Amino acid sequence: MTRPAVATGASALPPAYETVVHMLVDAAARAPDAEALVCEDRRLCYRDYLACVAGFARELEGLGARGGRVALILGNAIESAIATFAVHAAGAQLVPLNPIYTARELGAILEDAAPSVVLYDAANKAVIASLVRALKIPAALALGPGARLLDGWRAAAVALPALPRPDALATLQYTGGTTGRAKGVELSHRAIAINVAQREGLLPTLPDRERLLCAMPLFHVYAVSMALHLSAYCRGALVILPRYRPDLVLKTLVDEAITIFPGSPTIFTGVMAVEGFAATDFSRLRLCYSGSAALPEETLRRWQAATGCPVHEGYGQTEAGPVLSFNPVGHPVKPGSVGIPVPATELQIVDPGDGTRVLAIGEQGEIRARGPQIMTGYRNLPKETAETLRDGWLYTGDIGELDRDGWLFIRERKKDMAIVGGYNVYPREVDEVLYLHPDVQEAAAIGVPDAYRGEVIKAFVVARPGTTLDGASLLAHCARNLAKYKVPTTIEVVAGIPKTTVGKIDKKELRAMAAKQSEGRS
């Protein structure tokens, strides 16, 4: 008899807090003097961490944040960590956004989110001030070096506001869409807090002993889950790098005696290329995690051979709180697999067409999931919510299969999406920006393989009759309208773009063309 492709998290669910704010309060009570946050020459213990969160939460309350949304447009700094918890503690919904987004990208999201307060880096003042005026946002505060430092609250004896309710909305995390419009994922406090405990079920930490390195951007759901929240759960020290630089990552791993290192394929590849990597002492390093993009087996093999520390690869998405599965501690890492479901989670492989027929072990189909960490829906998008959440299941849009042991393998993406250095990029958005150029008649962007970043964007364009296009001017146009990682690495001006039999741009054929071009250069 053929077994259905169904996997259920078998591990017991560790203790889960009501909210992550409750989690931080508990950490400060149990380990008040333990080091909590490190960023360059600034260090905070858990007592001071909570004091700063409480003080800033009260300030946000005074600005009318409670019951509304607060946009966080900050780079990596102690302010990012404090503000994230403070927004939750103030009874507001956190809206973390990429600080390198252009005014066009930020404007569309801020208009949809309608925040009552915007927190931003001083370096972005001109862009943010213009948007705040245009969208009539009530309040905006510049934070971080060169502006207001939130660790000034450490000396203030301010009580926390009333702690948030588990069923209240906690985070509005924007993720791209195949339509080109960013979708706001609504996550409750309960979903986020339970997902922290679910991760702990497969990747147990050592309470009061861990030191974590965060080299990833703290506006990203992966960094928040696998670094910011994880460190507070185990009462460990979170060492934040203001920006990713491979040589600085390697130095910090040693200097700060890091025990847990969450990363991505791009980060691991970059660090291994640093001079002196092979001679580095990795004896304190205990666990490495990889997420946000597929980890090449060769990268996994090289890293483990050099450091003696395996990389536990996992899978998830913003809509799933975000973690769905991981290669668990205590089992050999299975190369190519993203592991088994976290506790209290069920994964199924279903027919991509009807979405209900469960396929057999070894068959490839769409991954659907259900569990307490799943989103409540997309903000202001009832149709998209109904398509993604059906009968209690989250339809991920990813194609995968389960082996006989219940381990999940991701095979491809159902959605038209590329993952560039760990960031989701939706080619449709790039297409739309290219169409904004007055001399572009047709445009089509695709993701193509890249040895360092996993994938990069390549675009094909057709010039309007009587005009002349060149790649350099088009790249400059894209750079003015897109975050750097979304900008195509190459733009090819062509006479025509292939179409399907019904007249649609044939991106499958474009990928085949790009693959042939790559083969011709190799």
Image (tube, rainbow, N blue to C red):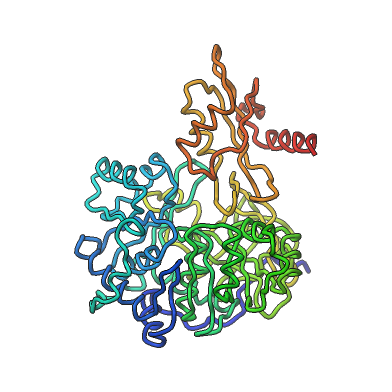
Q: Quadrant of the C terminus?
A: top right
* Residue in front for this viewpoint, 346 or 438: 438
Q: What is the x, y in percent for residue 104? A: 39, 39
Q: What is the x, y in percent for residue 490? A: 62, 34
Q: Is residue 427 above or below residue 279?
A: above
Number of residue marks:
0
Q: What is the x, y in percent for residue 84? A: 37, 65
* Residue in front for this viewpoint, 4 or 380: 380
Q: Which residue is painted at 39% across and 80% down in the image?
A: 46
Q: Residue furthest bottom?
A: 30
Q: Which residue is painted at 57% across and 74% down in the image?
A: 258
* Res 463 quadrant in image: top right
Q: In which quarter of the image is the N terminus?
A: bottom right
Q: Which residue is painted at 43% across and 83% down in the image?
A: 34
* Residue in front for this viewpoint, 167 or 393: 167
Q: Which residue lies furthest to the left in this view?
A: 62
Q: Is residue 483 left or right of residue 324?
A: left
* Res 131 quadrant in image: top left
Q: What is the x, y in percent for residue 337? A: 70, 64
Q: In this view, does 145 lie above or below 52?
A: above
Q: Which residue is painted at 23% across and 66% down in the image?
A: 59
